[in-house]
Image: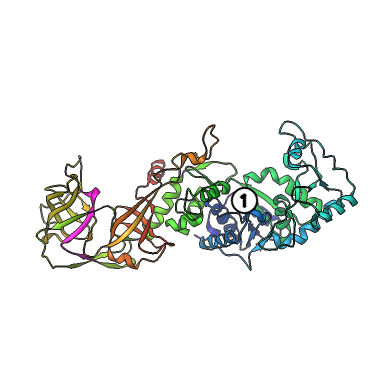
Amino acid sequence: MSETSKPGNFITQIIDKDNETGKHGGKVLTRFPPEPNGYLHIGHAKSICLNFGIAERYQGQCNLRFDDTNPEKESVEYIESIKGDVEWLGFTWKDEPKFASDYFDQLHDFAVQLIELGKAYVCELNAEQMREYRGTLKEPGKNSPYRDRSIGENLALFNDMKAGKFADGDVVLRAKIDMASPNINLRDPIIYRVRHVHHHQTGDKWCVYPMYDFTHGLSDAIEGVTHSICTLEFQDHRPLYDWILESLGTFHPQQIEFARLNLNYTVTSKRKLKQLVDEKHVTGWDDPRMPTISGMRRRGYTAASIRNFCERIGVTKSDSVVDVGMLEHAIREDLDANANRAMAVLNPIKVVLTNYPENKEEIFTVSNHPKNEAAGQRQVPFSKELYIDAADFAEVPPRKWKRLTLDGAVRLRGGYVITCDEVIKNHAGEVIELRCRYDENTLGVNPEGYKPKGVIHWVSAQHALDATVNLYDRLFDNEAPDANYADKTFLDFINPESLTVLSGAKVEPSLAQAAKGQGFQFEREGYFCRDAKEEGLIFNRTVTLRDSWAKIEAKGK
């Protein structure tokens, strides 16, 4: 479905009205403005799809701009990861990515202009005093004792800030607005602070850096952004956005807020995600349990599934929590249609076919995808000794058991019907081998009156490849790990079973050719992909076969 044919939302309604009135001459320019202080997560994916999608819908343009005003927490690593994530999701930007630091000279000049207008001043209150003077939601703030400095004195002091004559935290430049405003964001906010730190783009040129709220709107104005689309937490900042642009008389983009993506069983605070990485609760930003785009990609999520998910949850003005089952449904749906099938035995138990010739081998031709002939076929070897999954055998089966049991028959996927005659156990009483018979007349057919109860997957022991399989589950076992608890933090809800490593798995030989990152449905086990980072045959479980959300959705129709 093209962007123009997709259903609209309240943002497209605003843009449609602007185009009807000729507000911007039919021009639509959006931007995706991440701060390069961490990897992007699933919440950013919604913003990416929205901003780039709107640009495509109106044959406009979306800028990728890094709001890099806090070099202490930023890095080139984060910049490169963000660029890679946006491209992987299927979006491109015109020319080179933009940086707020590209505009530092202009932003400095804008700050000087505010001082000259009598709308900014240099303040020497320390952080504790600043909080005291700021007031509360119920009580107004009070004016700084430095608020009425002359324009000349403020210009000289700001120049000294720029020249490096002050230490970090000694002074700041504040906008002069209204300390009694009910909106705390308008109580003389800081717009510049001193930081003697190397910047990844500008080097050591600057020791004063603009604040995000000052930088964001002016960067939009400099670029000619028509619609500045932000998440709802910026709604209270919009009056400041407007005040800065109106005070300076610049081009004035329209800020529009939408509800951010909140998923249950998930944390998306970059500060908390960084804590997970720094404290080694996970292996890195791209750990497949992380809600980062890099982590989800490594786990086997596809770009199409994430885009489809973002489209389905829609764009609204009010916050809500989305069931993570919707996201899992989106990837199942995509992989069910597009992932080739393969056989992998995760917890192998040996099966010896006692009546199968000792040195005989057969090659079965099986479909790569039962619903897609274009996916082709593959060759699967068969021999006297096989592996099946331990979960597919029960010596004392429960009711309605449809797998292998002693004296019971079952069909091997794409192969013969076998019957179990004997169970071999070790000294601990654990089943280590099954002795079975195969029926040579059952290849691909069920003779009359002979209907085995179930079908199980298998691999030839002689031809099987050793593999490691990572069974990933949700990182948190609490539906709201990020809530405000009196005696717990989100770390207390880390799921101890979020990763189970199976080092003794056996997989069919065709998987030796699997490309890194390639996804498969392991028959009857779930969806997996070959790990894109590690060497060897390592497969990550993307998602199980069970789809509770699809059942919920169907029930509601």
The residue carrying mark 1 is 11
Can you give x and y, in whole percent of width and height, for residue 405 in the image?
A: 16, 47
Q: Is residue 253 visible?
A: no
Magenta span has 337? no
The magenta region covers: 380-395
Q: Is residue 386 left or right of residue 519?
A: left
Can you give x and y, in whole percent of width and height, for residue 123 in the image?
A: 81, 45
Magenta span has 383? yes
Q: Is residue 374 left or right of residue 384?
A: right
Residue beneath the point at 60% across and 56% down? 51
> Image height check: is 80 above or below 131?
below
Residue beneath the point at 24% across and 56% down? 457
Can you give x and y, in whole percent of width and height, for residue 252 in the image?
A: 74, 54
Question: Type of residue at label 1?
Answer: Ile
Q: Give the quadrant of residue 58.
A: bottom right
Residue beneath the point at 80% across and 40% down? 178
Depth order, front residue of 11/464: 464
